[in-house]
Image (cartoon, rainbow, N blue to C red):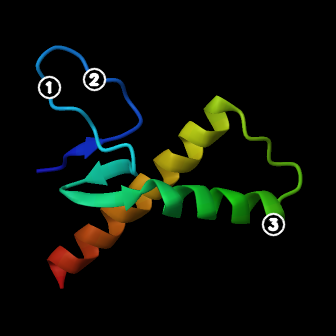
Amino acid sequence: MLLVSGLTGCSGDQPAMDKSIAATVNQIPIPLDEFETRLAQEMEYDHQFKTTGSARYQFLKSMIEKEILIQAAIDQG
């Protein structure tokens, strides 16, 4: 089963999210500092990259997709 949580707000009786985690993929966290570091590296590499909210979301989404592929590869051996 695939479970992903990310930079979303909490509502209702859900537990508060850890602000040091950018996203969690199947109980594997993507730390916020790792996300910020990789985002900064991308900005250094691609000077046309703009850090809009949409760009940050897309970058996080790509990190989540990579983590899903890594987990799938590990599961398949």
Amino acid type for the residue under numbered disc 2: Cys
The structure residue drawn at horizontal position 34% and vertical position 66%, both measured from the top left corner, is 69
Amino acid type for the residue under numbered disc 1: Gln
The reply to whether discs 2 and 1 touch (Cβ–Cβ < 8 Å) is yes
Crowding around mark 2 (Cα neighbors within 10 Å: few <14, some 14 to 19, many 20+) is few
The reply to whether discs 2 and 3 touch (Cβ–Cβ < 8 Å) is no
Q: Disc 3 marks which residue?
A: 45
The structure residue drawn at horizontal position 30% and vertical position 44%, both measured from the top left corner, is 18
Crowding around mark 1 (Cα neighbors within 10 Å: few <14, some 14 to 19, many 20+) is few
Q: Disc 2 marks which residue?
A: 10
In the shown orientation, is residue 21 left or right of residue 2?
right
Q: Secondary structure at mark 3?
A: helix
Q: CA distance from mark 2 to mark 1?
A: 6 Å
The structure residue drawn at horizontal position 81% and vertical position 66%, both measured from the top left corner, is 45
Which of the 4 image quadrants contains residue 72? Answer: bottom left
Give the mark, 1 or 3, whose residue is nearer the N terminus.
1
Amino acid type for the residue under numbered disc 3: Tyr
- Quarter of the figure with the C terminus: bottom left
Which of the 4 image quadrants contains residue 50? Answer: top right
